[in-house]
Image: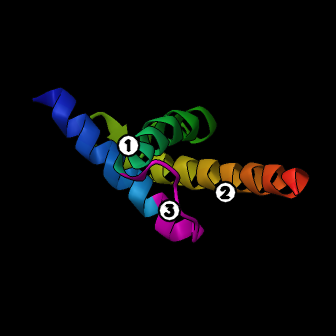
Amino acid sequence: MSFIWSLIVGGIIGWIAGLVAGRNIPGGVIGNIIAGFVGAWLGSLILGNWGPTVANFAIIPAIIGAVVLVFLLSLIMRAFRKTDR
């Protein structure tokens, strides 16, 4: 059951990051889950593990890390689209 909670919380974190960044995450729900997990890892590296914790995710650093990740991915994808034309 812990794994399912981690997937749900990771998906919600990715969804919130997409809303805050104003960008769509490619891959839909799976993309949101991946962005949530990678964002949580990135946020804990940069900011540490502080704030409220749900399903082993420090929520505030995870959301900040996911927003940074979504923003960087959108910049990279935009650069690749411009070079293809």
Q: Position of residue 35 (x, y in %)?
A: 48, 44
Tell me the kind of residue under disc 3: Gly
Q: Residues within 10 Å of mark 2 (few under 14, many from 20)?
A: many
Q: Is residue 43 visible?
A: yes
For the C terminus, the image quarter is bottom right
Q: Which residue is tagged 1?
A: 30
Q: Is residue 53 visible?
A: no
Q: Is residue 6 magenta?
A: no
- Judged left or right of residue 31, residue 24 is right
Tell me the kind of residue under disc 2: Phe
Instruction: Residue at 34% x, 43% y: name it.
Output: 10
Q: Position of residue 23 (x, y in %)?
A: 58, 66
Tell me the kind of residue under disc 1: Ile
- Judged left or right of residue 31, residue 47 is right
Q: Position of residue 62 (x, y in %)?
A: 46, 46
Between the residue at mark 3 and the residue at mark 1, the CA separation in whole angstroms equals: 13 Å
**Pointer 3 and pointer 1: residues touching (CB < 8 Å)?**
no
Which mark lies nearer to you, 2 or 1? 1
Q: In terms of image quadrants, where is residue 50?
A: top left
| Magenta residues, start to end | 17-28
- Mark 3 / mark 2, whichever is N-terminal: 3
Which mark lies nearer to you, 3 or 1? 1
**Pointer 3 and pointer 2: residues touching (CB < 8 Å)?**
no
Between the residue at mark 2 and the residue at mark 1, the CA separation in whole angstroms equals: 17 Å
Callout 2: helix, strand or loop?
helix
Q: Which residue is tagged 3?
A: 18
For the N terminus, the image quarter is top left
Q: Which residue is tagged 2?
A: 71
